[in-house]
Image: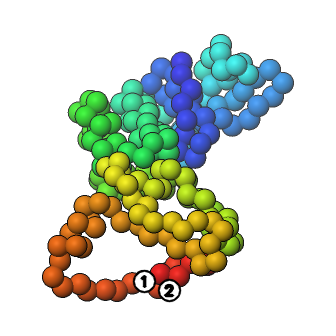
Amino acid sequence: MEVIKSNKGGSKLCYQGYMYTKHTTRKTVQWWKCVKRSSTACKGSITTSLQNENPTPGQPHNHDPSDISIKYTKSRYAMKEQAALTRDKPSQIFAQVVSTCEDDVQAMMPREENCKRTMRNQRPTPPVPQSFVDVTLPAEFTITTNHQQFLLYDNGQNAENRMLVFCSPDSLRRLAEAHTLFMGGTFSVAPHPFKQ
């Protein structure tokens, strides 16, 4: 028996090839229902202690157990967790996790682009500052994913006209070597108090 995280951050109980989500909790017992109760009208259930021990099966399932489905769920959660805790590229995380999966689990995986979108959504977004004094850049936002310096210039939080310039060394070198420059911008999407 094992408890893993669900897609929505809750708990899923895995037992003998079946997965359950928590239905209700009483004084000493937790009731769990089969995750396929909506898709296949399965009435399978199980009870455990509050410490997720002493499993007691309740109603029978209307489908076969599947260890592959459990491994798939664990793999998807591993991707999301790694995306939330690291700055690794989603493509790297996807390749790393999928390379450790069995063929049957790989066959269940959605398209790579869908998985990468889900992973990007796990990344915390800092709040939009109300003034330039509130702008504090965490170290992870001052470097590229290749660990190159990205914050090129910052005249300081107390500057009358705060200016932040972002550019990687490689991009700056290409800019210096260019004979013609084309400029443009997406001015309307810059959040207050910034201008682009």
The secondary element bearing badge 1 is classed as loop
Tell me: 108 left or right of 81. Answer: left
User: Coloured how?
Assistant: rainbow
Secondary element under disc 2, as helix, strand or loop, is helix
Q: Residue at x 17, y 73 (%)?
A: 177
Residue 143, how many percent across, how many down?
A: 41, 53
CB atoms of marks 1 and 2 within 8 Å = yes
- Residue lying farthest top? 54
Q: Residues within 10 Å of mark 2 (few under 14, many from 20)?
A: few
**Left/right of residue 135 with respect to residue 19 in the rendered view:** right
Q: Position of residue 117 (x, y in %)?
A: 40, 57
Image mark for residue 142: none
Q: CA distance from mark 1 to mark 2?
A: 6 Å
Position in image of residue 89 (x %, y %):
35, 49
Indicate which disc residue 186 carries.
1
Q: Amino acid at mark 1?
A: Thr
> In percent of the image, x 47 and y 85: which residue is there?
187
Quarter placement of the N terminus: top right
In the picture, measured across the screen, residue 82 lies left or right of residue 191, that is left
Q: How many marks?
A: 2
Camera sees residue 113: yes
Front-most of residues 25 and 90: 90
Rendered image quadrant of residue 24: top right
Would residue 69 be seen by someone viewing this image from the given angle? Answer: no
Residue at 56%, 26% (x, y): give it: 3
**Badge number at residue 188:** 2
Please tell me how crowded label 1 is: few (under 14), some (14-19), or many (20+) other residues with Cα within 10 Å: few
